[in-house]
Amino acid sequence: SQQGEEDPQALSIQEGENATMNCSYKTSINNLQWYRQNSGRGLVHLILIRSNEREKHSGRLRVTLDTSKKSSSLLITASRAADTASYFCATDGNTGNQFYFGTGTSLTVIP
Amino acid sequence: GAVVSQHPSWVICKSGTSVKIECRSLDFQATTMFWYRQFPKQSLMLMATSNEGSKATYEQGVEKDKFLINHASLTLSTLTVTSAHPEDSSFYICSAPPLRTGPEAFFGQGTRLTVV
């Protein structure tokens, strides 16, 4: 299976704290993306990082990529209750536009 | 931005019946679309790649006769769950990467299928 793994599986923090999620994958990639999913809803694209990039920022999001370790991390700073959702990393497995998703991290931000 | 629409959002059907789920790219064309399945509190599993004008490519372990995929135009792919059983109950999501843009894919809002 090309599915990656994420940790932690679940994370609960207080509003205002930072949340860090990690993703590990198995194959070489062209890019890695992070998505957010609210319960029972579709996916929202958050950020994409290419295999030749090491770090990327978007608003309160910071993504790192270590291709030698086949891992990525997503940092959400100054979390808000509205950030409560599941977060998935997805890799293209160097095969094109089909994505393989990690197992996901369920984030709960307590107001 | 690019929009992908799925219909229906929620469907309940009886065992043995077939259900069709549509995935439309509203403001762009897509030669390929992808169908995923998600069980509660689990990740998305790629089921198949839908190719416009040709046969779909199924992932290992996915029954092609059970999950019929048709990609008749550059803006529409359909997934038909045939002879549905309760174990087919799941959340089905499609995605479509726009042509001539970056690798970012856009996802439909998902279809929750419940087979009773």
Image (cartoon, rainbow, N blue to C red):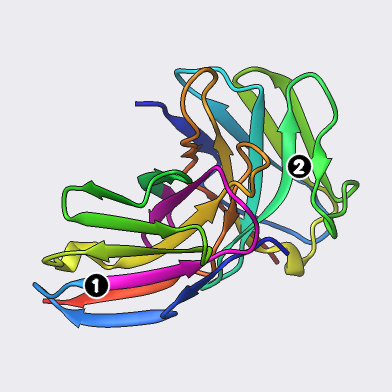
Q: Quadrant of the N terminus of chain B?
A: top left
Q: What element carries label 2?
A: strand
Give the number of the disc on residue A100: none
The answer to whether the residues at label 2 and label 1 have Cβ atoms under 8 Å apart is no
Tell me the subunit letter for badge 1. A
Check the image and report above or below for A20 versus A35: below
Residue at coordinates 49% horizontally, 41% vertically from top-left?
B107
Q: In this view, does A95 lie to the left or right of B91?
A: right
Residue type indicated by callout 1: Ala
Give the x, y percent position of residue A87: 39, 63
Residue type indicated by callout 2: Thr
**Outermost residue to the front:** A68
Give the x, y percent position of residue B67: 81, 47
Judging depth in this view, the residue of A109 and B77 nearest the camera is A109
Count of numbered circles on the image:
2
Segment colored magenta: A20-43
Please give the residue where the numbered disc 2 appears in the rendered image. B80
Label 2 and label 1 in one chain: no
Please give the residue where the numbered disc 1 appears in the rendered image. A19
Q: Distance between the residues labelled 2 and 1?
A: 39 Å
Q: From the viewer's perspective, is the residue at label 2 or at label 1 nearer?
A: 1
Q: In this view, does B61 lie to the left or right of A80?
A: right
Q: In this view, does A21 lie to the left or right of B29?
A: left
**Is A28 inside the magenta-drawn segment?**
yes
**Label 2 neighbourhood size at 10 Å, few (<14), some (14-19), many (20+)?**
some
Give the x, y percent position of residue B2: 41, 26
